[in-house]
Image (cartoon, rainbow, N blue to C red):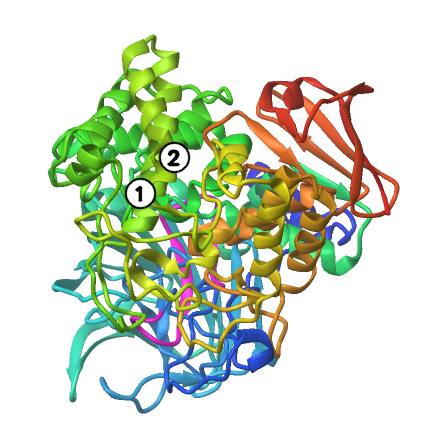
Amino acid sequence: MMRRNILLFLLLTSAFGASAADRLTAYVNPLLGTATLWEPEDLGYVRTWKQRTWGAEVFPGSSLPNAMVQCTPATMYHSGAGYQYEDPTILGFGHTAKGHWGGLHVPLLPATGRFSASDYASAYSHTNESAHPGYYQVFLERYHVNAELTSTLRCAVHRYTFRAEDEKHLLADMTHSNNDVRDWSIQREDDHAFSGTQNGEGRIYFYARTNYAIRNVWQRQERGVITDITFRDSRGEEPLVVKVGFSFVSVDNARMNLEAEVGEKDFDQVRAEADAIWERELQKIQVEGGTERQRGLFYSTLYRSLLWPSLRSDVNGEYRDARDRVVKADFDYYTDPSFWDDYRNKDILLGLLRPEVMADVISSCIDRGEKRGGYFPTFFHGDHGSAVVAGNWLRGVRGFDLRRAYTLLYNNAFRPGRGGRPYLDEYLRQGWIAEKDTTDVPTWDEYKAAVTKTVEYAYDDYATALIARELGEKQTEKDLLRRSMNYKTLFDRQTGFWRGKIADGTWIKDFKPYYPYYAYQYREANAWNSLFFAPHDPEGAVALYGSKRAAERKLDSLFTEPWRGYEAHNMTGFIGNYCHGNQPGHSLPYVYYFVDRQEKGQTILDSLLNHYYDMGREHLAYAGMDDAGEMSSWYVLNALGLYTYSPADPEYIVAVPLFPEARITFADGHVTTIRREGHGRRITRISLDGRRQKGWFVADKDLKRCRTMTVRVRE
C-alpha cells in the first residue's frame, strides 16, 4: 500500500505540480474547436439558414491517444461530436467520440430532485467548466453537482460531488447516442455494479462499479425512457464515483478491462496517469520561442491530431471482426482512419510520432479488407488507403504485411466491385468518370463527384505504383504510373479548370466554377478549390496552363476572387475563393512553389496559421471541420515548416517554420532540431547539418538522420 501511495504522489507531482513552462499539457485547450462560426466576416457569407454551419465538430471530454473511450459531454444528439459550445444544456456524458458524427455511447448524468424521461437536461456555464488532456469538469446548475471525468484506454471514471443534503441519482439514457440506437439493455449486477449493452454504430458492452451501494436500476417512462439508478444511504459529502469499463466484445471483457486498467485506483490517480501519458506524447515535439497563443494553438492541434483512429481490442487481445466473430490477433485492433480527409497529413503525422499504432491501424484495415470482399477499406467517396500504406511504409513504419495490403489495394485499383472504388469500371475504360448532364444542381444533391474521383484515383494509382515498385511488381508499377496521368483528362484548357464531362465526352454545359457542390463534379468544393490536384506531378499540372506565369495568374485569382456569398454548411473560412474550412484545397498554397513564387505561398500559409484556428466570438472555432484530426495536423506540420504535399512520397515540402526552433524526437530516440534563421517569407537556403539541399523537398530518411535542419529566410 505504501508503494502505491508513493507512486500516486509522484504521478500527482509530475502531472499537477510542475509549472506551465515545464508541462506541455498546460498549453492544450480541448475546448478549442468546439465553437461554431456565426459572423459573416468569419463565415465568408451572410447566414440565411436556421441551421448552424458545421464547426470543427470536436469533443472536449477526456481521452487518451487513440483510445477506445472518449468520455465527453453531450449537448445535442446527431450533431457533430455531440457538443456545441453555444448550447445551453448538457444531456449526459457519453463514452465514445470521433471528432466527427458518431459515438456518444451510453450517456450518464448525475441528478437530484425532480426530473422525468423527457426533462432531465441541466444548464451549465462556461465560467464553471474546464478541460485538460485526460480530464473534463463542469458544474450542473440544475442539480448542483460538480461533474468530473477522466479515462484510461478502455475505461472511464466519473466523480460527481453533490450537496450533502441531496439524494444521489445516476441517469443512463440508453435510448440515445449520436447514432440511431437499435436495442439496449441495462441491469444491476450486485450491490455495487451494473452492466449492459447498447447497439448503435456497433454494439458496445459496459460494466460499471460504484462506491455507493445500489438500491435499484429501473426505467422511468414519461414520453421517453430513461434508466434511473438509485443508491442506499446516498446522502452525504462523499462524491459518487462511477468506474466504467467498455468492450465491443462482451460484458465479461468490459469487466476485465476495468479490473486491468482501473482496479482500485482512485479518480486522482487515473487523472494523473492520463496527464502523464499525454505529456509523454506531446514531449515528442518541443517548440521554442513564439507567443503563448502560438504555443497554445500548436499543442492543442497536436493533441487533437492524436485522438483518432480509435482502439477496438481488449486487454486480452480479443476484438469483434468484420464478420462479427470474436478473434485474437498479434496487433491492437483499431477503427479505420477517415481516409478521404486524413490521408493528406494526419495519417503520416501519426506514423511519425506513433509508428507502432499506425502499423496496427494498417493491420486492422488489412484484416477488415480480407474479410469484406477483398478490398482495402475506403472512406466516404474515394480510396486513399494506398497513400496511407505507401507513405508510412516508405517512411520506415513496419509491423504490418505489405504484400497483403498490396493485394487488397491492387483489387481497389483493378477490380470493380462492391467495397472498392466507386465507378471504377468507367475509370478503367476511358481514364475518367462521367457526370450527369443537368442544370441548376443544388449544393447538397448527391451525384458522382466525378471530377474529384477522377483526379484522386489518378493519385491513388501513383501511390499503389510505389508499393508495386517496393514488391518488384514492375508491370503493375508501369501500368499504374501511366494511369496516374489520368488527372489531365478532365482539364479544360479554355476555362483553366478541371471540369466534368458527360458520357459522350463533351463538357458539362451548365458550368459554374464559383458554385459549391457536395457531390456534383466536385466533392465538397467548387471548381476553384479543385485546381492543380496532382500531388505526384505538380510540374505537370502547372504545365497544362502553357507557362508558369499563366498558372501563377490562375493561382492569384483563386486567392483574390471573392467568394460569391454561397451558403454551404461545410464550406467556411475563405481567402478569396480558397476555402480552408474543407480539405480539398489544403495543399493549394504550395502550388506557388512550382511557379517560382514560394514567398506568395508563404503569405497564404502565414495568414492561415495566424487567423483560421481560433476564430469566432470566443476564439474557439476552426475555419471548418477538423475531420478526425486533418485540420489540426495541417497546423502542426505547417507550423514545423514541413508539409506532406504528396503523402505517399517519403519527403516533405519545406515552409518557413512558425517557431525559431523545434525538436522532434522520433521513435528510435533520434532528435532532429528544426531552426529558422532570419525573418521574412522568402526561403533562401535549406540545409541539413550545414549541407545545402536542392529544391523545396527534404527526404524523410535525411530528416530522421540529421541533427539540425536549418531554414534561412529573408524579407
Counting from the top left corner in percent of width and height, residue 163 is at 49, 82
Say what amino acid the circle numbered 1 marks: Thr
Counting from the top left corner in percent of width and height, residue 85 is at 50, 75
Dots 2, 1 in contact, CB < 8 A:
no
Q: Residue drawn 51% across and 23% down?
A: 395
Say what amino acid the circle numbered 2 marks: Tyr
Query: Between 611 and 26, which is closer to the camera in this rendering?
Result: 611
Counting from the top left corner in percent of width and height, residue 25 is at 64, 51
Query: Between 698 and 696, which is closer to the camera in this rendering?
Result: 696
* Residue 438 appears in the figure: yes
Q: Which residues are magenta?
A: 60-79
**Eye-nearest disc, 2 or 1:** 1
Q: Residue drawn 36% across and 42% down?
A: 455
Relative to 705, say whether 47 is above or below: below
Q: Residues within 10 Å of mark 1 (few under 14, many from 20)?
A: many
Task: Report the residue marked by disc 2.
Answer: 459
Circle nearer the N terminus (2, 1):
1
Query: Between 204 and 686, which is closer to the camera in this rendering?
Result: 686
Q: Is residue 450 left or right of residue 12?
A: left
- Asked if residue 667 is among those painted magenta in the image, a careful observer would answer no
Q: Secondary structure at mark 2?
A: helix
Task: Report the residue marked by disc 1.
Answer: 454
| CA separation in Å, label 2 and label 1 | 9 Å
Relative to 586, say whether 95 is above or below: below
Q: Residues within 10 Å of mark 2 (few under 14, many from 20)?
A: many
Q: Main secondary structure of the magenta part?
A: loop
Q: Secondary structure at mark 1?
A: helix
- Residue at the extreme bottom of the image, as rendered: 114
Counting from the top left corner in percent of width and height, residue 468 is at 33, 16
Relative to 579, say whether 549 is above or below: above
Q: Residue drawn 47% across and 62% down?
A: 61
